[in-house]
Structures are given as C-alpha cells and as structure tokens.
Amino acid sequence: MYRRLPSVDELLRRASLTELARRKGHVAVANAARAVLDNLRAEITSGKLTEDDVEFAVGDIEIAIEQQLDRALSYSLRPVINATGVILHTNLGRAPLPQSTLDHAREISCAYSNLEFDLKQGGRGKRDMHVDRLFRTVLGEDVATIVVNNNAAAVMLALNSLAEGGEVVVSRGELVEIGGSFRIPDVMQKSQAILREVGTTNRTRIADYERAINDRTRLLLRVHRSNFEIVGFTEQPLLEELVALGRRWNIPVLEDLGSGALFDLRSAGVQGEATVADSLQAGADVVTYSGDKLLGGPQAGILSGQKDLIAKIRSNPMFRALRVDKLVYAALEATLMAYVKQDYDSIPALRMMRIPFDEIEARVKAVAASLRARSTGTTVELIDGNSVIGGGSAPSAVLPTKLIAVEHSLLSADRILAALRKNDPPIVARVEEGKVLLDLRTVLPGQEDTVVRAFEQL
C-alpha cells in the first residue's frame, strides 16, 4: 500500500497541480502534497486503510491536496458568533469594537500618521496626547493618562515605578489570580516591589494597613475583586479610608480597578461596579484598568491619575517596552470619542448590556419560529435565563434574558455544539441539562439567519 502512493515530485508534475502551483505558489502546494501523503502513510501504518481505501484516496489525491492547501492558506484567527450570553467572553476576544474604531484604525494604518509628530510645532511629539486629551474630557482636566499593552503590564509598571525595592501593603483578600494563571503576587515580584500582606482572606480593617506601614512602605495597593466575590462574614475598608491613611503618611494609593468602567452601569441594571471616575474622585492617586472590558475598546492597560505620578511612571524605561502601537491608539481614540459624544449604543458591549428585555424577547421569538419552520428533528422552546458580563467584570451581576433551548431527536447536545463550531462562521453556544442554549443578547444584529441556517444544515 505504501508503494501505491505517488511521490511529491510526481504529483507536482501533474497538470492540475502545476496550474495550482502557478496560482498559489510552488512551496505552498508542495507542502500541502507532503501533508496529504504523510497523513495517508500514518493511516496505513495504523491499519485504518484497506487496499481499496488507498486506491480511492490516490484517485482523489489532487482534490485532497487542494483542500489541504485551502486550509493551510486560510486565516487561523476567525470571526465567530457568540451565542453564549457572556458579553465580555475572554476566549472570544472580549469586547467587540465599535465600527468607528475599525474605520479610524484603517485610515491611520493604511497611510502615514502624526503618531509622534507635533503638527503645530513641526517637531517630535508624544503618542500619549491623542488619547490623553479625551481621557481628560471624560475624567477631568487634572487627570493624566498613559497607555500600555494590558492591565497586568499597567500594574507591573506602576509598582516598579513607584515602589521598586520598597514595600507595597495589600489585603490578603485581594491577592487575586487575574486569568491565565497570572497572580498579583507574581506580578508584584517581577516589579521588584516587596509584598506586605495584611488582614485575612475575608476581613481586613484599616488598622491592619496602618500597623504595616514603616519607613520602607512606598504604596498602599487596593485590587478590585473583578472575577469573584467574598460574601458572608466580611470586612473591607472603603477606598476613602485608605486614601485618608495614605494622605496622613504621605504614601500614594494605587487601585487596580481591572474592569475599567467609564460608564455608570447602574442604568443597565449592574450594581456595585465602581467607575474609574468614582475611584479618582475618592482620592486614588493612580488607577489601572483594561481597555477591552467594560470600557468596550481594544486590549490595553490604562493608567490614570495624578500628573506627577503618571509622569514618573512614563519616564520608566519599561514604559517603552510595554507601550502600544498606532492601531491601538486609533481604536482607543475612536472608542473614547463615543464617550465624549455620549453615543453609548455605538459601543457594542455597552449596547448589549442595555438591551431591553422586550427587545431580546422579540428577537428570540422570531428566531425560534424560523428554527421550527426550517430545521427538522429539533424541539425548540423559550425559557427564562440570565446573561452575564464576563471578562472578570461584575462577577455577581446578571442580566435577565430569554433563551432558546434546542434539542434534537438524533443528535446529542455535545454533537450539536461540535457541528455549530464547524459552521462558517463558527457558532459558540452553551449546554444545560442536555439542551443547547442560545442567548441572542450577544448575537450581533444580522447574524440571526446564519444561526438558523446552521441548524437547518444539521
């Protein structure tokens, strides 16, 4: 059976593959042919193929090579339809960007720009100024802001700039893991600051912070519990109390806010999520937060606070290693412009949080009717449920929604999920009690028919 397989050279001399190589490149076609042959040899070795199977495979090998080439030359990073109801789904890229950010990023990236050029003075400029002016409009004229590549970098840069070699006092109840096994103590260790834990997991008092202060204390750190909650017998000092203590001892207060809301989420029914402005008004000297969570923009780590401290952080040589490029600045500038204009519904993540229940219910009923009419073997019902914010933000917040629950007479829920992931574009849903659940809160307008067609093809 091995001998019946053609060589790569023999295959590349065939007319159809010669033409394919002319269009797609000789190396790419040769690699595809080699991959197909390697796969056939592996299947022969494992005993999966009979002689008839090999003969059939060899007869269709040119088609297999073309299919392999299409897979090899297609992008790995692909758009997917998020039907999970998790708005800031970390595995699915967190916040979808507003259309305006893509338009501005395209405009800036396809030409030269004034990224670091002062058009008024005709000399070198600073890239920060493009977003700093907008942050000042949103947060206040006395607030300075710089941007790095993510919030973990922002925390590490702030700690290294303000507390290198000194102690940072933090509650044991705030030593969180921020995802991907990255933990606050590990980030602090890399920053060359010394962790000084106070209090207990569930209870930390302002007196605990004060007893820990000594001549080596450089910072008081408060970490937002963005991806979990401690309930029951708990105590945590207010940020204002921590700020007052810092003022008394002339020690800055750094708050890692994480989620980074610029918009008051109470209007969307989300309680207890402090905004960046809340933290700054409470007196935090520096606040760090993410760009791609509740802010609804691109991935970025943002540091806002007192001008002298932000200037000190910016002068750290590590800032250059962690800074972002023109695409992120363009996307962030366009996102912030929506805040300045108070055009909140143009930011997809905020719009999803604010969708009225009646609107979701109407969409769900229309999609459910199409599913019943166009897909066979399925049982479709509407049930009450909850969407979640996700992305390590507002862990206890839920948004009431209406779900589509689908069962199939022949296919298990897991088989349906696997089939949906193979759709083009892939559809990601969730399973509960043996039923596939679709939450249309996170399905973008215009994607409904794609979901229905995917079930129709089952």
Image (cartoon, grey):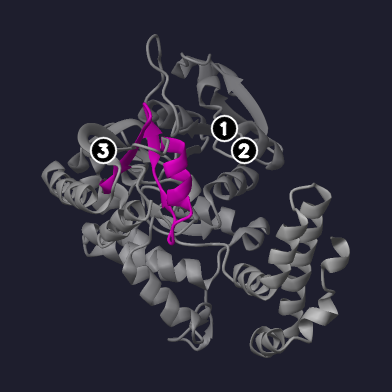
- If you read the primary sequence from the N terminus, does the residue marked by circle 3 or circle 2 appear first? 2
Where is residue 455? Give x, y as percent. 34, 51
Residue 386 position (above or below residue 103): above
Q: Which residue is mark 2?
A: 182
Q: Are marks 3 and 1 in contact (CB under 8 Å)?
A: no
Residue lying farthest right?
3
- If you read the primary sequence from the N terminus, does the residue marked by circle 2 or circle 1 appear first? 1
Where is residue 331? Give x, y as percent. 42, 67
Element under disc 2? loop
Q: Are marks 2 and 1 in contact (CB under 8 Å)?
A: yes
Where is residue 349? Give x, y as percent. 32, 52
Q: Which residue is mark 3?
A: 379
**Magenta part of the protein: which range?**
413-440
Residue 3 position (above or below residue 313): below
- The foreground one among 323 and 182 is 182
Element under disc 3? strand
Residue 6 inside the magenta-drawn segment: no
Q: Amino acid at mark 3?
A: Thr
Residue 422 inside the magenta-drawn segment: yes
Q: Residue at x 83, y 51 (%)?
A: 45
Residue lying farthest top?
233
| Front: mark 3 or 1 | 3
**Image position of 155 (left or right of 406):** right
Pointer 3: residues within 10 angstroms few (<14), some, or many (20+)? some
Q: Which residue is mark 1?
A: 177
- If you read the primary sequence from the N terminus, does the residue marked by circle 3 or circle 1 appear first? 1
